[in-house]
Each structure stands twice: as structure tokens, then as C-alpha cells.
Amino acid sequence: MAAHNPMAYLLEVVLRKVERERPEMASDSKYAELKRQLLRDAEEHFREIQATYATVLKTQCHCGGQLEPVDHDFGRSGGVIYDSVIAKCRSCGSSQSFQFPKEGFISEARSALALREYLQHTYGVDYVGMALSDLQSRSASRV
Ligand SMILES: [Zn+2]
């Protein structure tokens, strides 16, 4: 069973909406290229995240207990961006953090920015804003 990448899914949905509003984008090869690159990077980033989670599940606590991911930590320390998952032992409760690789995150963010700038410049469309309001309306309708 292939796991679904929620980020790539959201991108596809929002970009499809943008394309419906702006049919001329269908023949825009620059847009097609930026979109392909972003979806590829989102996929790569997702694979890195999955690999990190798999490592957490394979790692045993010093007490021999099973670790499970409980939290996600993202921030900045001394000018360095860090992104890690916090895992807690089911038996003794001690926690460890596992660093995600940064490459996928950085290339996805870079591609997302490039696409956002291009669409804003060329079509006056902010797909990131659309994605966020799409997310908000989804979580609102779940309540
Ligand atoms: Zn333990």
C-alpha cells in the first residue's frame, strides 16, 4: 500500500483550481516546468519524512522498549533551521529526538516559492493563500 502524500495532494487540488480559472495556463510551459519540479520535490521530501519515521520505529530505547513518535519540533537555533521528530518510549517514557534530513525540505520550499512568485507575477494568483483557505475550510467543515 503506497502512502499518500498529503502535501502533493493539496498542491494538485489547488493548482487544478487555479488552472480552471486561468485556462491559458494549459499552454504555459514555464508554469508546467515549475509545477513538475515542485511536485517532484514534495514527493522527495515526503519520502525523507517517511524514512525518518521508519527509523524511529526501528530504534529501541536503552531500556529495550519501543519508541513511538509523539511530537514534531521545528524551529531555528543559532541561525540553523532544525526539523525533528520527538519519540517517546512506551515502557519508561524517556524521549529522544530524530533529526529529519533538510535537503528535501529546502528544495521543496525553494520550488514552492519559485512557483508562487511566478504565478503572482504572471497571473496575479496566490496559490499558497488559496491552499491555506482550502485547508481552513476543510478543517472547519470537519467540526
Ligand atoms: Zn525506555
Image (tube, grey):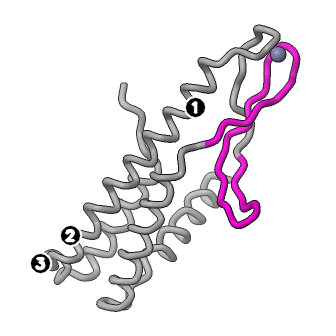
The stretch in magenta equals 73-99
Instruction: Please report the residue visible at 63 percent of the width from the left and 26 percent of the height from the top.
Output: 56
Residue 72: percent from left, percent from top: 70, 45
Does the magenta stretch mainly form a helix, a strand or a loop?
strand
Look at mark 1 in the image and give the residue it sits on.
53
Question: Which residue is pictured at 52% across the width and 40% down the height?
Answer: 49
Q: Tally the numbered discs.
A: 3
Task: Report the Cα–Cα distance between label 2 and label 1.
Answer: 32 Å
Does residue 73 sit above or below 20 in this rendering? above
Q: Is residue 132 above or below residue 94?
A: below
Q: CA distance from mark 1 to mark 3?
A: 40 Å
Tag 1 or tag 2, which sits nearer the N-term?
2
Nearer to us in this view, 21 or 68: 68
Outermost front residue? 78
Q: Which mark is residue 128?
A: none
Q: Is residue 94 magenta?
A: yes
Residue located farthest toward the left when viewing the structure as drawn: 27
Q: Which image quarter: residue 97?
A: top right
Q: Is residue 137 left or right of residue 119?
A: right
Instruction: Name the amino acid, label 3.
Output: Ser
Q: Label 2 vs label 3: CA separation? A: 8 Å
Q: Secondary structure at mark 3?
A: helix
Quadrant of the image where one finds ligand 1 = top right
Q: 44 or 76, which is in the foreground?
A: 76
* Residue 23, quarter of the rendered image: bottom left
Q: Tell me the residue that label 3 is attached to.
A: 27
* Residue type, label 1: Tyr
Q: Which residue is mark 2?
A: 32
Classed neighbour count for the residue bearing mark 1: other residues with Cα under 10 Å, few (<14), some (14–19), many (≥20): some
* Left or right for 89, reference 20: right
- The residue shown at (38%, 76%) is 114
SS at circle 2: helix
